[in-house]
Image: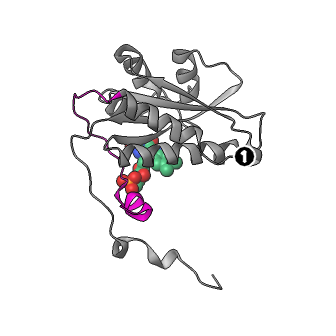
């Protein structure tokens, strides 16, 4: 499989089986995140791996729609960052999450990005990241960017085909 094949195969997987995720696969996914490029090599991200069912259930009310994912997944990686370390911590976190999302798919583990930053809980008032911080004991100075839900796929939407990509978004020489 080429890298492009791997990238085309990656999909958001939101349906999971009851099977456990092998620990070596979870470790590989975390290592992929740690190996991400980061501005000035500052590595502002922190990853919290959550496998405990009660903790995953507590996270379910962090935002609308979260219960659908966190209530069914077997594990989740919460990505937070020390935003004082570098001004482009959002990009750094996105890079790490993308590498973990891709690695999960390549290892046959389903995953989905659940947005936390800039989102509110179902009450419409509380910031999603405040709920996540409280449940996981993440210190106030860390911004919570997203949660990558993980589980063995009950179904996979299937690879993308080159012909289905929005090729009109590629511009050559001029916009
Ligand atoms: C920044 C970002 C935020 C996302 N937030 C959510 C989310 O909160 N819930 C969700 O189910 N999917 C979320 N997704 C997944 C997208 O819906 C998904 O990537 C998109 O529909 C394309 O589908 P694909 O990943 O299968 O290619 C997010 C993706 C990104 C990159």
Residue interval drawn in magenta: 1-22
Q: Is residue 99 left or right of residue 70?
A: right
Relative to the observer, which residue lies in front, 31 or 80? 31
Q: Give how far across and how far down residue 108 sits, in percent.
A: 31, 44
Q: Give how far across and how far down residue 137 sits, in percent.
A: 58, 15
The quadrant of the rendering that contains the C terminus is: bottom right
Q: Is residue 155 left or right of residue 144?
A: left
The quadrant of the rendering that contains the N terminus is: bottom left
Q: For the point 53% across and 23% down, which residue is it?
A: 132
Is any atom of residue 76 visible in this view? yes
Is any atom of residue 127 visible in this view? no
The residue to which callout 1 is attached is: 88
Residue 6 among those drawn in magenta = yes
Q: Main secondary structure of the magenta part?
A: loop
Residue 24 among those drawn in magenta = no
Q: For the point 60% across and 45% down, which residue is it?
A: 36
Relative to the observer, which residue lies in front, 7 or 134? 7
């Amino acid at each position: 499989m080429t890298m492009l094949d791997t990238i085309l195969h990656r999909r958001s997987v939101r349906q999971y089986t009851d099977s456990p995720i092998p620990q070596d696969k979870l470790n590989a996914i975390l290592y992929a995140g740690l190996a991400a490029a980061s501005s000035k090599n500052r590595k502002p991200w922190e990853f919290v791996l959550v496998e405990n069912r009660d903790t995953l259930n507590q996270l379910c009310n962090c935002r609308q729609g979260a219960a659908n994912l966190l209530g069914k997944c077997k594990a989740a990686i919460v990505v937070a960052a020390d935003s004082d370390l570098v001004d482009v911590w959002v990009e750094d976190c996105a890079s790490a999450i993308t590498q973990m999302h891709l690695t999960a798919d390549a290892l046959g583990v389903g995953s989905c990005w659940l947005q936390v930053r800039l989102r509110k809980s179902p009450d419409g008032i509380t910031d999603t990241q405040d709920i996540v911080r409280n449940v996981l004991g993440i210190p106030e100075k860390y911004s919570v960017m997203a949660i990558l839900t993980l589980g063995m796929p009950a179904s996979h939407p299937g690879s993308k085909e080159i012909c289905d990509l929005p090729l009109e978004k590629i511009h050559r020489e001029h916009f």
